[in-house]
Image: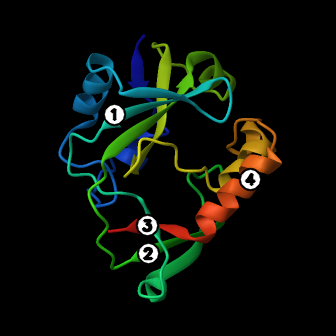
Amino acid sequence: MSIVLTDFARPRLFPREARRNTIQDITPEEFVRYLNEVAPVAVLDGYAPFCKLHVHRNWTSTRCLAVPITDDNRHLLRSDYEARTRDELPVLVRWFEGLEPPVAEYLIPILYSREQLAKEGTLIDADWGIVGCMYTMAPEETPMAPITMMRNALGVEEGGSGVPVDREAYGRAVEFWRNHANWRG
């Protein structure tokens, strides 16, 4: 099985200007090499058959991305309308500023199959393409943000995958994200 980093994920995981809330201490090439050479501690099914999550112990200083919202940090929450690419519609997002989360125990790359990526207009010369990565304390999936589920249901022309909303998974995601937020460094 071979893995590559997609053009979609590269600027989010390895931006040109380093940010503290992205993958630390390694280059994109080192990251991909590691994923191709080191077996994950677990492989989880993603939200659709074309999506897999490879659970790796964190070998970097990358920090957890999702942080619980508490009375002590609620005042650090910020929000704005943002799009991940120029072609997507901006959606409401929220995040913490001025917070120092713990170093993640696990890095969990999100992989899409070559066939799904081709449907979305991305051709790769590997079996799987990295479309994102979770930085977590537990070896389990962080629920997809509800707005990402909605975008996926809109279809590939709106930046999604074409997978309909699963109401049960959406409810679990709302419960998680009602009590957590990402952070920006």
Q: Give the residue pinned by disc 2.
A: 96
3D distance between C-alphas at marks 3 and 2: 8 Å
Q: Quadrant of the C terminus?
A: bottom left
Going from the N terminus, do you reach mark 2 or mark 4 first? 2
3D distance between C-alphas at marks 1 and 2: 25 Å
Q: Give the residue pinned by disc 3.
A: 67
Q: Give the residue pinned by disc 1.
A: 56
- In which quarter of the view is residue 146 placed? bottom right
Residue 29 position (above or below residue 147): above
Going from the N terminus, do you reach mark 3 or mark 2 first? 3
Do the numbered discs 2 and 4 sit on residues whose CB atoms are within 8 Å? no
3D distance between C-alphas at marks 3 and 4: 19 Å
- In which quarter of the view is residue 165 placed? top right
Residue type for callout 3: Val
Task: Determine whether, in the image, residue 23 is placed left or right of residue 2.
Answer: left
3D distance between C-alphas at marks 3 and 1: 20 Å
Give the residue drawn at x 60%, y 58%. 83
Residue type for callout 4: Tyr
- In which quarter of the view is residue 51 placed? top right
Residue 56 is situated, as x and y percent measured from the top left of the image, at: 33, 34
- Asked which secondary structure carries label 4, the reply is helix
3D distance between C-alphas at marks 2 and 4: 22 Å
The answer to whether one can see residue 90 in this image is no
Residue type for callout 2: Phe
Give the residue drawn at x 39%, y 77%. 97
- Asked which secondary structure carries label 3, the reply is strand
